[in-house]
Image: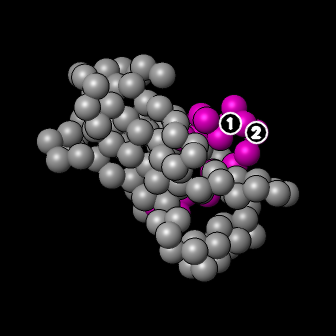
Amino acid sequence: MAERTGRIELDIRDDRASGNLLAYKSGKAAGIIAYFVMDGEPAALVAVHTVVEPGHEGKGIAGALVQEFYAMAGREGVPVVPLCSYAAKWAERHPGKAPAAPTELVEQAKRRLTSRPELY
């Protein structure tokens, strides 16, 4: 999906198999959200870490990634659990675009991440 963020155009792609939502600018990696999927009832997408590549900071890439992550979850009909500090702060600033996940779901995601650090 191509997205324009202020001055730049990004190509954001979901690599579900590796648990990465990737942003590319001019064909080169610009940023990533590492995540995992919680299957079952309730299911969720869990944002673990957001990274913007050196030289791309301050251009809205992290925000565009988090916004697309929430949009992706919305299309799938599942909540987002923002364990990533950047995603959590973005959600606080954009409550209309980032509905809060149920507390028990957040706790389940934290336990899963603690028991499986390779997800980070």
Q: Residue furthest right?
A: 41
Residue drawn at x 49%, y 60% as measured from the top left:
48
Q: Which residue is mark 2?
A: 77
Q: Is residue 77 magenta?
A: yes
In three-dimensional space, the C-alpha distance between marks 1 and 2, rounded to whole angstroms, equals: 5 Å
| Circle 1/circle 2 CB separation < 8 Å | yes
User: Horizontal and vertical percent for residue 89?
Assistant: 44, 56
Q: Is residue 43 above or below residue 28?
A: below
Q: Residue 104, how many percent across, how many down?
A: 75, 70
Q: Is residue 1 visible?
A: yes
Query: Given the image, on which type of amino acid does mark 1 rest?
Result: Gly
Q: Position of residue 118 (x, y in %)?
A: 50, 69
Of the residues shown, which amino acid type is indicated by label 2?
A: Gly
Determine which of the numbered discs, if any, sits on residue 112 in the image: none
Badge 2 local density, few (<14 within 10 Å), some, or many (20+)? Answer: few
Residue 74, disc: 1
Snapshot colouring: one colour
Q: Residue furthest left?
A: 55
For image coordinates 35% across by 25% down, the residue present is 10
Quarter of the view holding residue 107: bottom right
The quarter of the displayed image where residue 6 is located: top left
The secondary structure type at the circle numbered 1 is helix
Q: Position of residue 7 (x, y in %)?
A: 24, 22
Q: Furthest residue to the front?
A: 17
Query: In the image, is 49 to the left or to the right of 68?
Result: left
In the image, 90 versus 113, the foreground residue is 113
- Magenta stretch bounds: 69-84
Whether residue 49 sits left or right of residue 42 in the image: it is: left
Residue under the image location 61 percent in, 35 percent down: 72
Residue 26 forms part of the magenta stretch: no
Q: Is residue 89 visible?
A: no
